[in-house]
Image (cartoon, grey):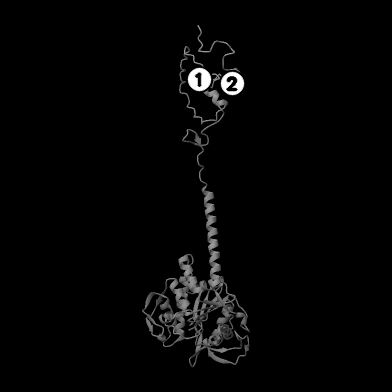
Amino acid sequence: MNDWPDRRTGDRSERYGQGSAAPRPESARAMPHVRRPAPAPPAQAPRRPQVPPQGRGHDDRHRSGAPGHGGPAAGYDSGYNTGQVYGAGGGRRGGDGGYVQGRPAPDWRRRIKLGALTLVVVVLVVSVSTYFWADSKLKREVDLAKVIERPEAGDGTNYLIVGSDSRQGMSDEEKKRLRTGSAEGKRTDSMMILHDGSSGPTLISLPRDSNVEIPSFKGSESGKVFPGRGRQVKLNAAYAEDGPELLVRTVEFNTGLRIDHYVEIGFGGFAKIVDAIGGVELDIPKAFKDKKSGADFQAGKQTLNGEQSLAFVRTRYAFAGSDLDRTKNQQKFLAALASQTATPSTILNPFTLYPTLGAGLDTLIVDKDMSLWALADMFFAMKGVTGGEGTSMNMPISGSVGSNLVWDKAKVKQLVEQLNNDEKVTVTGD
C-alpha cells in the first residue's frame, strides 16, 4: 500500500523538494497518519519580548518552517535568538508591538544658561539703542571754546543750569495756557551752579538781579573780542547781550569758578517733562497767589502738573518782588523733579522713560562737550541735594545797589575755594 500522496511514487526523478533541481520548491507535506502530541508548556516559562517584524530572509524561512529547508511547521518556536535585545534603555512599547526609545530628560541647566544669555543680549541691544537715540536728541549748541580767559579747573564738576523764558516751539494756545506771554527772543529766568564732587553735591542759585561786571569777551557770532569797560549790570543782561557764552564768561569772571558744562531748558520743555513723569509732588509750606504767573496754591503736600509747576518756579510778585524767595522755590522744585525722575520706576519703565527723555531732550540745549553720561550725572547729583548728601543755598548777598543784589565778596571767595578743593561747603547764603 502506498502511503504517499499523489505523485509521491518514490521515484527520485519525479519528486520535488530538498535537494531537487526543480525550479520551484515542493509544497508542505501532508502526513495525516502522524499525530504529534502538543508539548506541555514549561512551568513558569518567562515571557519573551515580542520580536519586531523583520525583513524576509534566512531567519524568516527558518522560523516559519519554510519548505525546502527542513524547518518546523508554522507556529513552532525553535528558541532561536538573533542576538538583538529589545526594550533596553527605558524604551516604551510602540503601537506596532515594537519598542521606541523614550524622550531624554530636559537639560534645565543648559536651558537656564541659554535663557540668561538671551536676556543679556536683549537688554544690551535695547540699552545701546536707547543711548544712541537719546544722545542724538541733545542740542549741542553752546561752544565753551569761545569763552576766553578762563579760570583754572578745580576738583569735581561744575554745571551752569539755566532756565530761559524761550517760547520756541510753543503754540499760541500753549503760551496762553502757561501764561508765558509772546515776547520774542529769550532771557534767563533762573540760573544755578551745581557742583558735583566727592564731598557731596552743592546747588547755588544765582539771582538774576545779581550785580555783576561784564568782562572782555569774544562775540559768539562775530568772533570779535570786545574789551571790558567795567560795566555793572544785572546778571541776566549778559545772556541777553550775547547768549550762553557771554553768560558763562561773566559767571566765571565774577566768581573765579570754572564752568565745565552748560544746560538750558525753556518754558515748554520744562512743563512737558513734568507732565511726562506724571507730575511732581511738593510740600508747599504757605499758600500764595500770583496773577502774573497764574500761581494759586494752598499749603500742604500736592502734586503739580506742568502748568502748575511752571507757575510755581516763576512766581515772584507773591513774595514782595524778592528774587531770593523765588530762587529758593526753584531749588526746591528742581531737586524734587530730579528726585522723582532719577528713580528705577522711571528709568526701568519704557512707558515712562521714553516720553520723559523725548520731552526733555528735545528742549535741552547743552554745550558741545556734554555727553549723555555727564547729563545723567547732573540729574543724580541734583537728586542728592535733597537726599541728605548735599547742600542748597543762594549766592551770599551783602546788600544791594538800586534794584541790583550785591554779592558778599569774602564769602564768595571762601565758597569758591571750598568748591575748587572739593571740600564740604560751610559757607551759608541767604
- Circle 2: element type: loop
Q: 252 and 16: which one is in front? A: 16
Mark linked to residue 73:
1
- Circle 1: element type: loop
In the image, farthest residue toward the top: 1
Question: Number of marks in the image?
Answer: 2
- Few, some or many residues within 10 Å of mark 2 (<14, 14–19, 20+): few
* Residue 316, placed above or below residue 112: below
Residue 29 falls left or right of residue 319? right
Q: Earlier in the sequence, mark 1 or mark 2?
A: 2
Res 309 quadrant in image: bottom left
Q: Which residue is mark 2?
A: 23
Residue at image point 48% right, 76% down: 269
Residue 243 falls left or right of residue 294? right
Residue at image point 53% right, 73% down: 378
* Residue 103, placed above or below residue 60: below
| Residue type, numbered disc 2 | Pro
| Residue type, numbered disc 1 | Ala
Q: Position of residue 204 (x, y in %)?
A: 51, 80
